[in-house]
Image: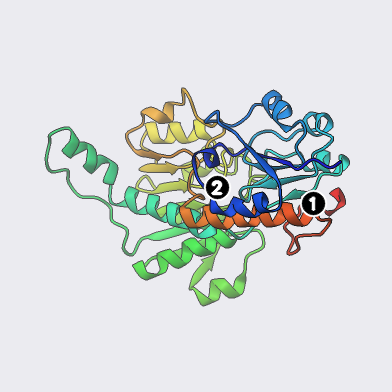
Amino acid sequence: MTSRRILVAFHVLARREAAFLQPLKDAGFELEFNELGRRFTEDELIARLQGKCAVIAADEPYTDRVFAACPELKVVARFGVGFNSVDVEAATRHHVPVAMAFGTNHESVADYAFGMAIALSLDLPRHHRTVADGRWGGGFHPGFWGKTVGIVGLGRIGKAMARRCEPFGTVLLAHDIAPDETFAIQHGIALTGLDDLLRESDIVSIHTPLDEKTRGLIGARELGLMKPTAFIVSTARGGIVDEAALNDALEHRRIAGAGLDVFVDEPPLGSPLLARDNVILSPHIAGVDENAERLMGERCVANILAVLEGRDPGEGFVLNPGGF
């Protein structure tokens, strides 16, 4: 008999009464939550997936070993749009579809990246510390109006970022390996090479996926092209920006500041970036505002129900149709 038990591995959902999970309960599924307050390790994931037919996944490791040890698992539904933690080839070999929540959190991520860009440009962290330390004054800040914003990756999130910048009189540059030229023309975006974008931008915002081509995309050489007054923001994936090179550039004031929501190691315990006074750091949270949470949750539930009923959820949500 097929299992009717589902693991909700994303620990944040253990602390919320999420209405979007109700259709699973209505369909007779029993839900088990991750109460640890953190992601599962590989061994913990294997133990908790025993007897489960589906999982609502965060970024815990879905390896060949996990799939081999969990024969009842029928679908991995990612609560998000990245899949770096899932061995998709292994999932396919074990006939486990990997379903994504594409198109659900791009507005949330763009809001966050835009907020970081504004906060850095207005020097809000320094001004906050000035008042909190009992001091007053603080000098001029760069401002955001009329600045040149370089968007690296003009997909859903990059486009949403561009739309937010438009009303502020910004000059928009973008770099993408397969740019939407129609969108660029409509929004007055100059498509350019990465080096030129880095040289000319006052704010650089990273919106590319992480793959072998983008790993280490922004390293010491690239940071060296930026203006000493420029800021860099990344809400994409850890590993795209070389953190050691970024720390060195910040330490020697070769760039003015950075906003990071993503890191190679999460949390980035012991990272020298934690001690910098010209950075804004956050815990990989850009894509999960309340609206995005609802949309991602609804998509996950729809994906699970479709796959367990033997249907393709459609619209390219399943990464590996061969997993069916």
Q: Residue at x 76, y 52 (%)?
A: 319
Residue 79: x %, y % from top left: 62, 47
From the viewer's perspective, is residue 159 above or below residue 26?
below
From the viewer's perspective, is residue 232 above or below residue 164?
above
Q: Secondary structure at mark 1?
A: helix
Residue 216: x %, y % from top left: 60, 39
Residue 320 vs residue 307, the one in the foreground: 307
Residue 111: x %, y % from top left: 44, 57
**Dot 2, crowdedness within 10 Å: few (<14), some or many (≥20)?**
many
Q: CA distance from mark 1 to mark 2?
A: 31 Å
* In the image: residue 56, left or right of residue 313: left
Residue type at mark 2 is Ala
Quadrant containing the N terminus in the rendered view: top right
**Dot 1, crowdedness within 10 Å: few (<14), some or many (≥20)?**
some
Number of numbered discs: 2
Q: Earlier in the sequence, mark 1 or mark 2?
A: 2
* In the image: residue 254, left or right of residue 159: left
Residue type at mark 1 is Leu
State the image quarter where residue 314 is shown: bottom right
Query: Which residue matches tag 1?
Result: 308
Q: Secondary structure at mark 2?
A: loop
From the viewer's perspective, is residue 268 above or below residue 190?
above
Query: Which residue matches tag 2?
Result: 236
Residue 63 vs residue 187, the one in the foreground: 63
* In the image: residue 35, left or right of residue 69: left
Q: Residue at x 56, y 62 (%)?
A: 192
Q: Residue at x 50, y 53 (%)?
A: 109
